[in-house]
Each structure stands twice: as C-alpha cells, then as structure tokens.
Amino acid sequence: MFNVDNHYDLPRDVIQKDILCQLIGRNELVIENYKKLLLFLCDEIKIQCASFEIRIKGENLAIAYYNRQTIIVNGVFHEISFL
C-alpha cells in the first residue's frame, strides 16, 4: 500500500525527503517536507519543494497552519500544479 524502503521498512518520504501531499476534499491541502513559501495571494499560492514548485490557484486561499516542515492551505481550489 505504501512505498517503503525495503532495507529499513520506512516510508519513502522519510528516506528520500520527498514531499507528502494530502488533499482533503476541495478545500484543504496538507503539504509535508516543503522548503519555503514563494508567493501568497488570495487567489494564488506558490510553495517551493526540493525539486519543484507547487502552484495552487483558487478563491479565498489562506494558510491555516505552518511550521518548518508542514503547511496547510485552505480555500476553494481550482487548480493545483506541480512545476
């Protein structure tokens, strides 16, 4: 079910520092292991990850929570792109 490293039996996001994105309905996005916030507008948010950016377009976008490794974005999402 989950991609794990066979030697350590740990999730790939932990071993390879990959991001983990969880979309909850159309109104909440949880991103773990991000690098930094690049752009924050009410209709567009850009987040830098290790090797790409995530662009979120929508309405009434807001950052509900963030710390050094996790960011939670709320709003009405129209488009989520991996650039």
Image (tube, rainbow, N blue to C red):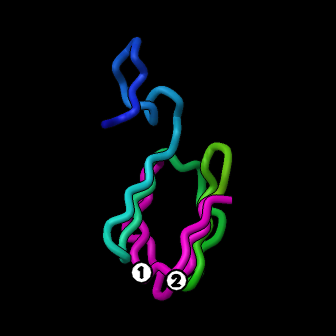
Kind of element beneath mark 1: strand
- What secondary structure predominates along the stretch shown in magenta? strand
What amino acid is at disc 1?
Gly
- Please state if 42 lies on the left or on the right of 71 as rendered: right
Q: Quadrant of the N terminus?
A: top left
Quadrant of res 38: bottom right
Magenta extent: 54-83
| Residue identified by numbered label 2 | 58
**Position of residue 14 measured from the top left corner of the image (x, y, whole percent):** 43, 31
Quadrant of res 5: top left
Q: Which mark is residue 20?
A: none
Q: Is residue 75 above or below residue 38?
A: below
Residue at 63% x, 55% y is: 48
Q: Which mark is residue 75?
A: 1
Which residue is farthest top? 7
Q: Mark 1 or 2 closer to N-term?
A: 2
